[in-house]
Amino acid sequence: MPKTKKIIADYWDKKIPIQVPENTIVPEVPPIELIEDPHSAVINAVENPIGSPPLSELARQAGSGKVVIAHDDLTRPALPRKIIIPVLMDILNAAGIRDEQVFLLSGNGNHCKWSDTQFRRYFGDEIYCRFRPHGSASRLLNHDCHDRDNLTFMGTSEMGDYVEYNSLLKEAALFIYCGTVLPSNWGGMTGTGVIIGMPSSRSMVSTHGLPVVGHRDSCHGDHRSMYYRSHKQAVMARIEKSIGKRVFYVDSVLGSATRLAGIFAGYSPEINEPTWQLAEKLYTVEVPQADVLIYGIPRIGLYGETSNPLISLAAVCAPPRIWRNKPLLREGGVVIGLVRCTGHIDDNAHASYREVFNLYKRCLSAYELQEYEEEYLNRQDLIFKYRHCYSYAPIHPFWLIYESEYILKWAGKVIFAGVPGRENPLAPPQIEGDGGPGAVRSMGCTPARDFEEAWQLTQQIVGKNPTVVACPQFWTTVRPSFYVI
């Protein structure tokens, strides 16, 4: 019997041991040197920005006008915002800008809006109370991708993108965006957050639709050559041409415990290359091309609980897209996700997910699903739930399917291990509708009782001595960017 070793993997709300082949590669990002004095680092970055006048000068030019500090939404870590926003306010105040002129705007994209309670928990009392007076006229705002009164059509980008964005971009005398730079299947690296955080749903189709996110030149992690990112930059250029000014970015590069490892400020694309160089230095891990990829999946994903089949699908299929040089998984290889997919969909938080999931079951591929986009861009019942009931936007589940299509077609099999079934002690049922196994099969994946069963299925495809790369805590530790040798 081949020798094995034990690794500890995320599974739902616990860590579980699994036995993998002894030669399994378990890549980890090396320890990251953190900024010792983040407060001073932020001041230095915004007062010595890249391609831009200092923030203090931009603040003086803003005069008595409206200032917007936009930020990645609450799916991104809070700590960088807690450090950066007070520094920005000190500089704005010193330039004569009163607190009453400044608005915080959450770049929700097609994600849900956030309640006052969630904002308070995220920002802490000091920032929350500074922007949220006791009356109803809050300066703590959610972007609304269906608010026709507060969206402005800004034209068409040079790549054909429909550019319709939050009107505050045009109204503000100074627009600042606080972003986060991390390895991602969406663009290789995150960053330049206005494009994703502030569009209408119709505009989001331009960057998140299948022709872009499913394009072969978007299905990798090279931010310099990625087709998806070229659309983002074309949109950014169109926005700035329309509004007649530049967006001032303050982007954080994160280390362990979401602490700052780097901070960059200035205009985009000017800040992109320096930011990428640091991110590459910190996050790049060399690995061989894998016959088998193994991922642990925690209970909470980017969009909610991974019991939801579409959220679990994205959590399993996104990481294999984050590669440079050559595909992380060889064509016809196997992906194993340790995921407790029960099939449960929270119809309050994800009002359109169940319908879209059922539509997908009737489609041969994601390409057919595109025919339903127009309906979900205009479904007033679902739009109401998004605008007033804290649900995700109606179009959002389409993106999760589109981003997963590459791996579903590239891999020989995608296996969900630990799926609840009637006799699975690891994951007691608590299932509904089609149940965990049925939901997994409906997505084109294979359910398995546990890792051992998943491994037996895997060997039928890859043989007895495969090259295995395991990221058992990919979503709960510092995320690697894979350079495949």
Image (spheres, rainbow, N blue to C red):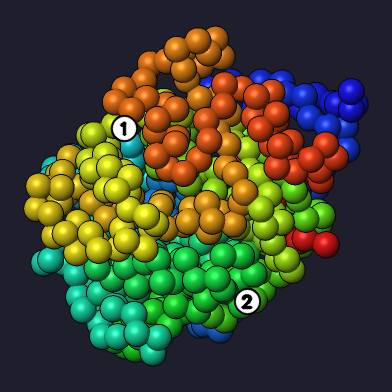
Query: Quarter-wise, where is residue 209 in the image?
Result: bottom left
Q: Determine which of the numbered discs, if any, sits on residue 345 in the image.
A: 1
Residue drawn at point x = 62 percent, y = 49 percent: 412
Q: Amino acid at mark 1?
A: Ile
The front one of 287 and 451 is 451
Image coords of residue 449 (percent x, y): 57, 21
Q: Are discs 2 and 1 less than 8 Å apart at CB?
A: no
Q: Is any part of residue 73 visible from this angle?
A: yes
The front one of 73 and 380 is 380
The vertical placement of 182 against 172, above or below, is: above
**Viewport quadrant of the N terminus:** top right
Residue drawn at point x = 32 percent, y = 53 percent: 363
Q: Determine which of the numbered discs, if any, sits on residue 224 in the image.
A: 2
Q: Determine which of the numbered discs, if any, sits on residue 65 in the image.
A: none
Q: Earlier in the sequence, mark 2 or mark 1?
A: 2
Q: Amino acid at mark 2?
A: Arg
**Viewport quadrant of the C terminus:** bottom right
Q: Residues within 10 Å of mark 1 (few under 14, many from 20)?
A: many
Secondary structure at badge 2 equals loop
